[in-house]
Image (cartoon, helix red, strand yellow):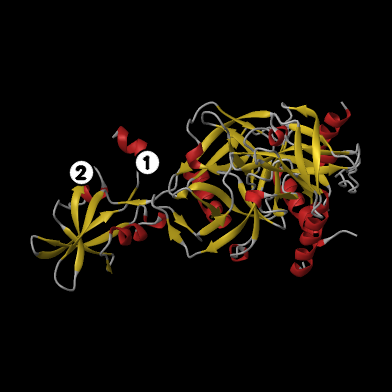
Amino acid sequence: MNTAELASDVSRAADALRRVTVEIRTNRGGLGAGVVWREPRAIVTNAHVVGTHETCVVRFTDGRTREGRVVRKDEQRDLAQIEVPGDDVEGAVRGGRGGGGAARLRPGEVVLALGHPFGMSGALAMGVVHAWGERWIRADLRLAPGFSGGPLADAAGRVVGINAMVAHGLGLAVPAEAVEEFLRA
Amino acid sequence: MVSMLQTLSDNLATAAERVGRRVVAIRARRRIPSSGILWRDGVVVTAQHTIQREDDIVMTLPDGTDAPATLVGRDPGTDLAALRLAPTNAPTGALDVAPLDAIRAGSLVLALGRPGTELTAALGLVSAVGEPWRTWHGGRIDRLIRLDIGIYDGFSGGPLVDAEGRVLGVNTSTLLRGAPTAVPAATVERVLGQLLEHGHVPTGYLGVGMQTVALSEQATGLMVMSVDPAGPAGRGGVLLGDVITAIDDKNVSDPADVLAHLDAGQVGKPARLRLVRAGQPTSVTVTVGDRPSTERRRQR
């Protein structure tokens, strides 16, 4: 196995994820991440990132900032949908293997997470799928505050979930299927 | 085009899936089950410290079914235990075990577990491979394998697997003061053989408590501070206050020297102790016994 090639694969996947990951800031200074979803078209983050706010500031990877409006929220699934006028970023490629998506994730599979820990923009974390569950994808990777709402992707850079929290050292992500169900509800 | 990262990912997931077919959940303690590996047909190896009750042990097999299991034996020295499944279970075939010298610092490894019905995986590195060592419980381990890996529910008793899907050892969090380590497969094979044969790992036993003392500026010995009167040394005539200077002509100056000499092969054999008694050199020959377990000692 060629390690130089492996390293460039990781940075290529990180670049692709950065293009679809936004920063979300509320007027109380909270900072989280969000994902530009392709189908259906939306910006998704965690409900706990926007809290009780109705608006937030969305910063795209090219530096543009726009005011976003929270249009839908599901506290139980920890998801929120944000609408931004005139957003033209091409959405994330969703991890879907024969429609299986997260359902087909196998323990040991490599996963990547992108977020903004401690204000550090577009930071990458890499690990593996720890276990798959209906409600959460549990991942063995090191997350920190600021990864919330950002993408969890497979080794091909396809988004398989939205990172939501850390429990007992494991990253918990909402599976992509649940995100789509939420957006279509 | 499939990238190198995807290939790595696929290899790791395939390794987890392959070995995962032999990873079971063991319900022998309160709350969260521990993990075990179907090492041979009908025989499961796990971390000894996770077996907190010896009756009513139930395993959850990889196919999700529950099966009763019985404890074959345990060895606190290496933190290994062997359990037997009902003989009706289908054969599992030989385990793909990596040779001892294939364990290298820097290798990518997976720790697999089954703390319930689902298989779990964690990725990490072999951070160091050391010499053979003796644990603080006296167990002999063929290599010290230090791991840089997350310890999650079900870590102890699960297999350490390399990227090719070979089993390197059995994970445990208790032998290195809470740090993750693995007992190498070679040690597991050796201990498992003894557990299946004797139900425990026979360890040579003299039945004395010793402390290092200086005999002169150059020489040190081991003063006998306590004697088990029913033990081999007590029956052989060793007295409180005797200073042991050699066993079978090997000088001893630390209790660890005695332990090292009393390994499994010595049980039942005579050992000649060179002593200093009341200032005079003398010697006694004792028959090395089999160290009773803490429980068996308590019953005496």
Using a 10 Å C-alpha cutoff, classify the residue at mark 1 as few (fewer than 14 neighbours), some (14 to 19) or many (20 or more). some
Residue type, numbered disc 1: Ser
Percent position (x, y) of residue A96?
A: 88, 43
Percent position (x, y) of residue B133?
A: 44, 60
Residue B210 appears in the picture as rendered: yes
Task: Name the secondary structure under disc 1.
Answer: loop
Relative vertical location of residue A139 with respect to residue B7 in this rendering, above or below: above
Residue A105 appears in the picture as rendered: no
First reached walking from the N terminus: tag 1 or tag 2:
2
Task: Name the secondary structure under disc 2.
Answer: loop
Residue shown at the point (60%, 43%) measured from the top left: A169
Give B268 or A107, whichever is nearer the viewer. A107
Relative vertical location of residue B252 with respect to residue B194 in this rendering, above or below: below
Residue type, numbered disc 2: Pro
Q: Which residue is mark 1?
A: B293
Using a 10 Å C-alpha cutoff, classify the residue at mark 2 as few (fewer than 14 neighbours), some (14 to 19) or many (20 or more). some
Percent position (x, y) of residue A79?
A: 76, 32
What chain does mark 1 sit on? B
Rendering quarter of residue B114: top right
Q: CA distance from mark 1 to mark 2?
A: 17 Å
Give B266 or B296, whichever is nearer the viewer. B296
Residue shown at the point (53%, 58%) measured from the top left: B145
Q: Which mark is residue B229?
A: 2
Q: Which mark is residue B210?
A: none
User: Is the residue at mark 1 from the same chain as the one at mark 2?
Assistant: yes
What chain does mark 2 sit on? B
Quadrant where the C terminus of chain B lies?
top left
